[in-house]
Image (cartoon, rainbow, N blue to C red):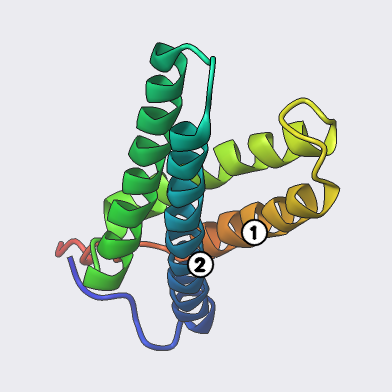
Amino acid sequence: MTATPAAHVRTRTGWIALRIVLLLETVGGAWLVWNVLQGILGAEGDPIGDLIVLLLATVLFWGWIALTAWGAWKGRRGWVRGSSITIHVLLFAAATGILQGLIGPETALGLELLVLAFAGFVAAILARPDAPEELES
């Protein structure tokens, strides 16, 4: 596979934007894991199994985002693009749930996640992987 030509400004812009969005999501995910951990340590009377599952799901999702961000920075373009599209579709669903009040009453957080999901999705669509080499006749 050859590299995508440098003339593809949209592709390069898409990769730059995707790396920035994934970096923001990785930092935000670490903040979320920390807050969930603090909430679990301060919880009284809640079933410990539910709290552990919540922490485990949060850590796994954060790890997925961090691994995708690492892949974007290291140039693993094929699987990073697919992973990013999936992450941002799920983030869009979470933002919609927050805006509807199903996950929490935080309208500002829902709007922020909605903008981040949309920006990440568009960046992942623009960030094309390497083009295959021309077949010789």
Q: Where residue 36 appears, x then y in whole percent?
A: 49, 40
Residue 4 vs 21, above or below: the answer is below
Q: In the rendered view, does 71 fall on the left or right side of 88?
A: left
Image marks 1 and 2: residues in contact by CB distance under 8 Å: yes
Q: Which residue is at a point 43% across and 70% down the rendered structure image?
A: 19
Q: Where residue 103 appears, x then y in whole percent?
A: 71, 29
> Mark 1 or mark 2: which is in front?
2
Residue type marked 2: Leu
Seen from the viewer's position, the closer of residues 107 and 80 is: 107
Q: In the rendered view, does 115 fall on the left or right side of 89?
A: right
- Gap between marks 1 and 2 measured at Cα: 9 Å
Q: Which mark is residue 136?
A: none
Name the secondary structure under disc 1.
helix
Residue type marked 1: Leu
Q: In the rendered view, does 74 fall on the left or right side of 59?
A: left
Q: Is residue 37 visible?
A: yes
Question: What residue does disc 2 label?
Answer: 24
Q: Where residue 5 appears, x then y in whole percent?
A: 34, 82
Q: Where residue 115 appears, x then y in whole percent?
A: 72, 58
Residue 28 vs 7, above or below: the answer is above
Q: Which residue is at a point 83% across and 30% down the rendered structure image?
A: 101
Q: In the rendered view, does 97 fall on the left or right side of 55?
A: right
Seen from the viewer's position, the closer of residues 50 and 70 is: 50
Q: Which residue is at a point 66% across and 34% down the rendered structure image?
A: 93
Residue 13 vs 123, above or below: the answer is below
Q: Assess disc 1: are there few (<14), some (14-19) or many (≥20) residues with their C-alpha within 10 Å of its C-alpha.
A: many
Seen from the viewer's position, the closer of residues 34 and 61 is: 34
Q: Assess disc 2: are there few (<14), some (14-19) or many (≥20) residues with their C-alpha within 10 Å of its C-alpha.
A: some
Q: Which mark is residue 116?
A: 1
N-terminal of the two: label 1 or label 2?
A: 2
Name the secondary structure under disc 2.
helix
